[in-house]
Image (cartoon, rainbow, N blue to C red):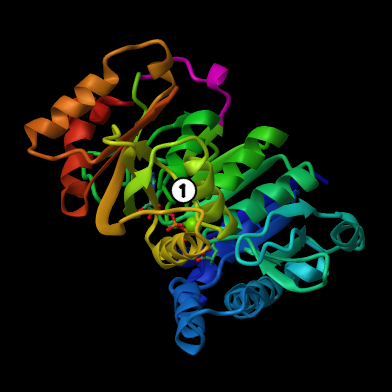
Amino acid sequence: MPVLVMKFGGTSVANLDRIRRAAKRVGVEVAKGYDVIVIVSAMAGKTNELVGWVGETSPLYDAREYDAVVSSGENVTAGLMALTLQEMDIPARSWQGWQVPVKTTSAHSQARIEDIPPENIRRKFDEGMKVAVVAGFQGVSPEGRITTLGRGGSDTTAVAFAAAFDAERCDIYTDVDGVYTTDPRICAKAQKLDKIAFEEMLELASLGAKVLQTRSVELAMRYKVKLRVLSSFEEQSDEAGTLVCDEEDIMESKVVAGVAYSRDEAKMTLVSVADRPGIAATIFTSLSEAGVNVDMIVQNISEEGRTDMTFSCPTDQVVRAERALAETKEKGVLNFAELIADTDVAKVSVVGIGMRSHTGVAAKMFKVLSDEGINIKVITTSEIKISVLIDRKYMELAVQALHDAFELEKAV
Ligand code: ADP
Ligand code: ASP
Ligand code: MG
């Protein structure tokens, strides 16, 4: 039997009614003759609640216990989904990550999937089970402990199963009907895209568009998984949603495909560090050893042998970054006057494969922001994206102005 992977996000399984509605969609695919692997998220809001409980109990928590707690939301929805399908006379069984097993690294709270041996689930399909419901977001480490894959990780579970089972398609059911030119919740003119290239989706995801977890796009690209994003609230059809596909499969693409934003950025400035070989290495080695994900980096012009070094990182890693740099200073290998953390910034980015061959996108972006009176604090570019750090209060305005300026409402 051909295998189909269907993933339902938090809002799509937010209560028993929605679980029933999702189960009906699964039933439609079973009736077409598929063996279906359903990946479920926790009910909407549940994971946030669990994360909150962990932080309240233990601010510097043990990551292994964090995973034990926050993975539990998916266990509930997996069991409920299997029960709902059974009530519809569809042979279904639920699986937690360790039961499959979904083998991951031991990087707790940020684990990567290493292997999904398909035998156990295959055997059940051979015995007549029609649907395997798998708890998303979780796996098991080589030490035998429960791990989680980072926020939004059920998308990655879904794509990894699609690759492991050579599925015909991986359908990601969510609360919007596809991938848009920007987040439709902050820009009313956002347009749904019928197709988007893997590379553009990868950039958009890594720059903050949380509709797909970045790692899921990476895996889909590597294992050539046919990946589709669609709504669990609207009528189903074979053309529904957005197909994430190879660049070659898109007839005509615009210079800029989309605008992404990330609210949770912090700008960190080390004031007056020595400007000599090895200093950047010392700073960023200590940050990386502390598990800080540094994004943008700027070094100022030096004066009398000293300079300022600015970098950005997620806001929830500011304390970790401060601690790491203070410890490095105490060891006497780094000297700086002060470390200033600006946590009221956001990152806004424009993304498009067309930038490889078109000039002037950066100039236009900076002009648009300056016309709106928005000051740019840090800039980074790559082949297909330009990102700026700005005051958070201007984030939505910047997204809307850029969406207008690059005429993304005419995207389709
Ligand atoms: P789920 O719980 O189904 O995994 P998420 O909340 O993780 O859903 O992702 C869907 C959300 O992603 C949408 O509600 C939307 O606000 C947001 N989003 C951000 N950027 C985009 C984009 N470019 N296209 C579509 N949705 C986007
Ligand atoms: N429930 C997890 C989260 O909220 C995983 C997911 O939904 O993808 O991050
Ligand atoms: Mg998600």
Q: What stretch is highlighted in magenta?
A: 245-254
Residue with the most extreme front position:
304
* In this picture, residue 124 sits left or right of residue 328: right
Residue drawn at 59 percent across, 56 percent down: 289
Q: Which of 373 and 219 is in front in this view?
A: 373
Quarter occupied by residue 181: top left
Above or below, comparing residue 242 to residue 357 in the picture: below
Query: Magenta includes 252?
Result: yes
In percent of width and height, residue 280 lies at 47, 41
Quarter occupied by residue 148: bottom right
Residue with the most extreme bottom position:
57
Above or below, comparing residue 60 to residue 136 in the picture: below
* In this picture, residue 10 sits left or right of residue 296: right
Amino acid type at mark 1: Val
Whether residue 91 is visible? no
Question: Which residue was labeled with disc 1?
Answer: 294
Tell how many labels: 1
Residue drawn at 30 percent across, 58 percent down: 338
Quarter occupied by residue 227: top right
* In this picture, residue 163 sits left or right of residue 328: right
In percent of width and height, residue 61 lies at 56, 80
Q: Nearer the viewer, residue 227 or 215?
A: 215
The quadrant in which the C terminus is found is top left
In percent of width and height, residue 238 lies at 55, 38
Above or below, comparing residue 377 to residue 173 in the picture: above
